[in-house]
Each structure stands twice: as structure tokens, then as C-alpha cells.
Image: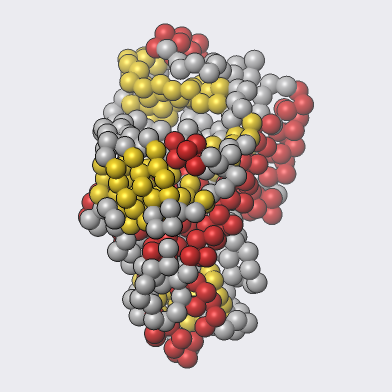
Amino acid sequence: MDADVIIAGAGPTGLTVATELALAGVRPIVVEALDVRSGQSKAMNLQPRTAELFDLRGLLPDAGEHAIGRIDGGHFAGVSLDYTALDTRYPYQMGVLQARVEELLEDRLGGLGGDLRRDWRLIGFEQDDEGVTVHGPETLRARCLVGCDGGRSTVRKLLGVAFPGTDATRWNTVADVILGAGTARPPAGWSSMGQARRRRPDGTFASVVPIGEPGLYRFVYSGGDADEPTTAEVTDRFHLFYGDEYELVDIPYASRFGNAARQAEKYRVGRVFLAGDAAHVHLPIGGQGLNTGVQDAFNLGWKLAAVLTGQVPDGLLDTYETERHPVGASVLANVRAQSAVQGPDPGNTALHDILTTLLALPDANRVTAGMISGLGVDYGGPGHVGTRLPDFRTGTGWASELFHTGHGVLLATREDHLAPALPYHGRIVSALVDALPWDDVEAVLVRPDGYVCAAAPGEDVKGPLRAWFGAAECSSANI
């Protein structure tokens, strides 16, 4: 085998899968069609749950060094959401460009000994009982393949997985532009996704947001068609909305995106998996795209590593689809709902006004903020099982610091609750704490991706230990 896992695509999703595997001692090869990182801004925010996941691996401080600002809260169809109502250390969106996220993850992968091969276009593959043979500039052999190669995924198409949904009916445009002062100065700080927003009577809109480098801005406007935007079109639209308010100096990059919404019917077929945009595409309302993909990757990465290192049976990998497919469907549903209430139609306007009133109610805000931020994801189970572990103080540190190794974590307020994890040395980090986030819990077993798989009293942790982390002794791979 050339690797344990081949990952197609070096975007945030693919690189996150790769770093999770490498952290666990599994050998990944990432293959990417582009010869160099594009450097285009693309996505530009980390939602609170993604910030928490990066914090679990010690990545958040480095991400913070590249932050261009923060937004205190989120929005649903343009209606503000208060993230401070949620139990998190990060009740805001961190402004970090996708290019910087990719750079951070690529550096981490290199530090872990991972292999990234650029200018490498996957053109075919076959899987058998022992592994997957992948064809491109060379032929590579691995035990599994993960397709993280975007909405037009070659892996998904070759796999024959259906991608049902709806085609685009409306189009928006995003451009990286260089601006100078005209009759006014462009905004210097980043405080809103709709910063310097302009709306016309026909319902069309535009906004500009600074994205880190001096003079560099994200310009977004509604309208257009399926064709890629020309420099002339972007220039015309900019002057239509901003006149001579700002000077348009240059347009390094521009691209069109539509409101198509599609989701792969399956996330797993044998030894091949789909994640990120290869598994789901949607309009980037609310800044959920990159974040949903990275969260897919954190769910899949540790499970794939656990199976490939022989810790647990292959059946654990089926939980990737059963857990993440409903999350993807939920994101598509909320995006469709947001898109439906936007536009100049009087009915849409009236519905938007009612939505504004409803989201001012604390309970409605909390549920909707949990949906958009990713903090509300619940994989199901009794009590606290299936929910994320909120970060909390453990003496002089934070619980999140215990997850930096990528292992599971057992936290307890009594020594006897820690005993079952003793045979799992090297797979489970155990810690005695003064208190847990919930008054009714004396011990909590947490997966490497930060989700609870057992809580005591009410459930013996021995059964979940074996179910999620395998037998105390393991020696051979299961897939």
C-alpha cells in the first residue's frame, strides 16, 4: 500500500481529514488538482462549533493570528442572531479566510508527516476487498479513499452516487477587489457579513467587507446568470451600487454562485467516503459551507483512524453517514428557508418581518442560533449522549486541552468512575475534575470529536467504551 488513506482535494475538508488521520498515526496522501494554493479568499468565517473543534486540536491560536475580525453573532435570512445565548467560549464568528485555513492545516499536516501532492488530478479508481486503487499522474494504492473534491466531485461521479436536489434559479457574484478612497473611505474593520450593504428598490443588493490585506475587499452582489462574471460586469455593478463613493482599483478574482441545493444519497460506499462539498452543496447563506465540511471531517477522521488501526470493527464507519447525512440535510433545509424569505416580493417582505419578530424571542433565537452556529448538532441518545461537551475549567486549564492528542476523554468527579479506562491507555485520556457542566453527571465519556457517548450515573461507561473505542486490547485492522 502506498498509504492507508488517499484523500482527493486539499481544501479545508480534505486537509482536516488528513490531519486527523496523521495525528492518529494513519498514513494519508492528499492529492490536489491545483498546482498551487489558489490564494482566493472564498469562505471567510469560522462558526462557533468549528472554532471549538479547532480548539480541541490546539489549532485555534494559529487561526486567530490570521483573523481579520469577528462578528458578534450570526444571522438567519439577514435577521441577527445572538450567539451569547449559547453555552460556548466563542459566541461569535471568527473572520478567517479559507486560504488561511488551508495554509494552517497544510502546515499542521506537514508537521505530522503527511503527504500532499499537487498538480495531481484523480481520473479513476477501483475498490476491492483489500483496498482502493486510484489513478492519476501515477497509480496509488490505499486501504480507503475519501472524496473531498468539491461540488463537481469526480469521486462522487465515478462512485455512481446520486446527487439529488434543486438546480440554481438565482445567482450571486463574489469578487476580491482592490479599493481606494473616493468620496468616502471604505470600511476599515470587519463587523458584519453585510458590511457597507446597499439595497436597490428592485431587491438587488451588494456589500463590501475588508479581508485583511490593505485595500483588499470582498465585493458581493446579487444578480447575473450561470456564466462566469466578466471584469466589465463587476465594474458596472460596483459603480451601480457605490457610484464614486469608493475607487475600484483592481479585480483580482471574481466568481458566480447559485442557489442550487443538492446532497449525496450516500456518504459511504464500501471503502470510499464523501465529505464537504462533495457530499452537499448549497447557497452560502449564514456562512455554513466550510464549517459543515470541516465538521464532517472531524466526525470521519477519528473513526477512520480507529478502524484502520484495528481498535474497533468496521461498523463504526457506518455512523459517519447516519450522523452527518441528517446534519447536511438540515443545513440544506435552513438555507432553502432563508432563500425563500429574501427578495422584493411583498409576500417575502411580510414573511421576513414576521421572522424578525419571532427571532427576537429568546427561545427562537437560541434554537436558530444553535442551528446556524453548529452548536445545536445532536447525534441522539439518552440524556446528554450525542451532544457536544461544552468547554469548562479543569483546575488551571480547560477541558478542551485534553483533546489535543486526538484521543477520547473520560472526565469524572470520582476516582472509581475512571477505573474502566485504565486498559485503554493511549486511546483514552482520563482526568479527575471538581465538577462537570451538568449537575446530574458524575462522569462523562467523550469522543475525540467532542461529542458525549456516555454519562454516569444513568449509564455504565464500560459498554460505550467498548462500542466506541473497541476492546481493551487490539492488534489488527478491521478494514
In the displayed structure image, the side of residue 132 where residue 323 appears, left or right? right
* Residue 235 percent across, percent down from the top left: 42, 11
Where is the C terminus found, in terms of image quarters? bottom left
* Residue 152 percent across, percent down from the top left: 47, 32
Residue drawn 42% across the image and 12% down it: 230
* Residue 94 percent across, percent down from the top left: 42, 46
Q: Nearer the viewer, residue 79 or 449?
A: 449
Whether residue 196 appears in this view of the structure is yes
Residue drawn 60% across the image and 25% down it: 168
191 versus 246 height, above or below: below
Where is the N terminus found, in terms of image quarters? bottom left
Whether residue 88 appears in this view of the structure is no
Name the residue at the bottom extreme: 416
* Residue 237 percent across, percent down from the top left: 48, 13
Residue drawn 69% across the image and 54% down it: 363
340 versus 380 height, above or below: above
